[in-house]
Amino acid sequence: MNRMLIVDDEKLILEGLVQLFTQESTGDLAVYQASSAIEALSVLARKKIDILLTDIRMPSMTGLQLAEEVRERWPDCRIIFLTGYHDFDYIYEAVKRGSVRYVLKSEGDARIFEVVQDTIQELEESLRVESLLQQAIQLQKRQSSHYRSLFLSDLAEGLLNEEEFEHSSFMDLNISLEKELPVYFAAARLDEGSKRLKGTEKDYMFAALDALCQRYLCPSVKITGYSDSHCYYYLFIQPKDDTLLSREMIHAFLIGSFETIQRSAEVTLQLPVSFALMDQPMGWMETSRAIQVIKLLFYPYHGEERIILTEKSMASVTLSDENSNYQELAALQQQASKVELYLESGQKEALLQLIEMLRAGLRPFIMEDHKVLAAYSSYSLRFLIGLNKFGLSDKPQIQPLLNMLMNPIIHRTWEQAIDILMELALLFFEFQSSQMSMVKNDVIGRLKKYIHQNLSGDLSLTNLSEQVYLNPEYMSRLFKQAEGVTLSDYITALKLDKAKEQLNLPNLYIQDIASNLGFSTAGYFTRFFKKETGLTPQEFRSKSL
């Protein structure tokens, strides 16, 4: 929505122009007014103005001086001067200072309206260009290592589904690997000696570690990676297109390169580093499970330094059958963070699907299994936080369910425990929908009441939006959704009905009726009425009486 400020020290001209654009615009123009350039500066201090429609000759400060002030505050504002025949010297000065439009007052409302519409079109075209530039800026941001790290981190935490992954652009993310090919997963761990590092120092060490990996691995493989800001740097690895290395050769190359990187990190950074490597390549969507396995590889070696681990070397200790049975559960537990996101953003279907995934994951286990209880508790705690955040935990319908939510052992099966999660989710979205309906109904009710009580007053989108504390564009869209008509059409219909009622009262003058309905002159009212009915007010009155 564009904002236009109309400035003129002649009251009738100012009111007439405001009336013209308030009634004739299609709802995409918010109109402000000022009776002097000084008053206009006050508006400019509070609002971004897209179009300035101003008289030139005004006391204290001219329209030309005002235009200079506008250019200082809002350089993209379009300026239209209202001029008389004797103002061409001023216009010549204005044109020399920058791009402006001008229109003679004597050309009438239709011409003024046309020039403003042309200016709005020009603004729209400009926005399209700015949008393209903004997209280019966003593309540059996405290519940064920070954005790439966020993407890989979301993938590792199971926050990206397959569709979101497929729609991601590795080129935009500056990832040189192939989306269609499997990857080798590895991780470098900053060992115990790194605990002394502060946050910024650790960031530096991760950057240096990445540089070492690029130097020693890239001759034969392509890599990308990210750090978790704690102690791990995760590596995604694929052989280069021009290599014919077997899996065994790649594996040997990686182990040997990790040894070199360890020595280099020790010498150049005084940094002890350990590595863990998955034996087989895996699909991208298995990232979450791969990261869990890598962490399990490191787990028994807490406190050790400069070691290199593989699945085979640790299978008898870390990857027992029992532990591998819990890998899927661990990956599922990581997705618990999605609960709050889905609650806050109103993603009902996504949350219900997540709960069903949890149901399927827990189904094979007994209720007394503490590892499974931990996974379930991750979800139930997120639900409790979300319900408290929205003030729903004290609701009578919610409280009994919360008691059962936080005590899953009272259920005989995980199936029953998950049913409680599902019921809470449905109740949450039911409350959310009800609350939104109440808010919308309240806004629409206040709008309609204000319009009915102020038919003779300022019913511009700008003023109406200030009554309900919403921006004009959203308010207009909300009203159209609720009532099925635009605000402009609603006000027009209401004024038309009131006009017909009052025209049936023979003692009321046309001028009085125009004033009662907020028209500055009888002429504006007559044009409005004839446009809507095909009759002048007097013709309508003659036919009715």
Image (tube, helix red, strand yellow):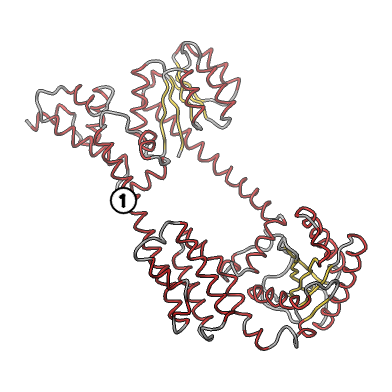
Q: Above or below — where is 372 with respect to 532?
A: below
The C terminus lies in which quarter of the figure? Answer: top left
Q: Above or below — where is 276 with respect to 45?
A: below
Q: Residue at x 74, y 70 (%)?
A: 236
- Residue 518 is situated, as x and y percent measured from the top left of the image, at 27, 27
- Residue 34 is situated, as x and y percent measured from the top left of the image, at 42, 22
Q: Secondary structure at mark 1?
A: helix
Quarter assignment of residue 523: top left
- Residue 212 is situated, as x and y percent measured from the top left of the image, at 85, 63
Q: Residue at x 76, y 75 (%)?
A: 298
- Position of 505 with respect to 283 (left or right) is left
Type of amino acid at the residue the image marks with label 1 = Ala
The residue pinned by badge 1 equals 482
Which residue is more in the foreground, 152 or 518? 152
Mark 1 closeness class: few <14, some 14–19, many ≥20 residues within 10 Å:
few
- Position of 459 with respect to 149 (left or right) is left
Which residue is more in the foreground, 467 or 272? 272
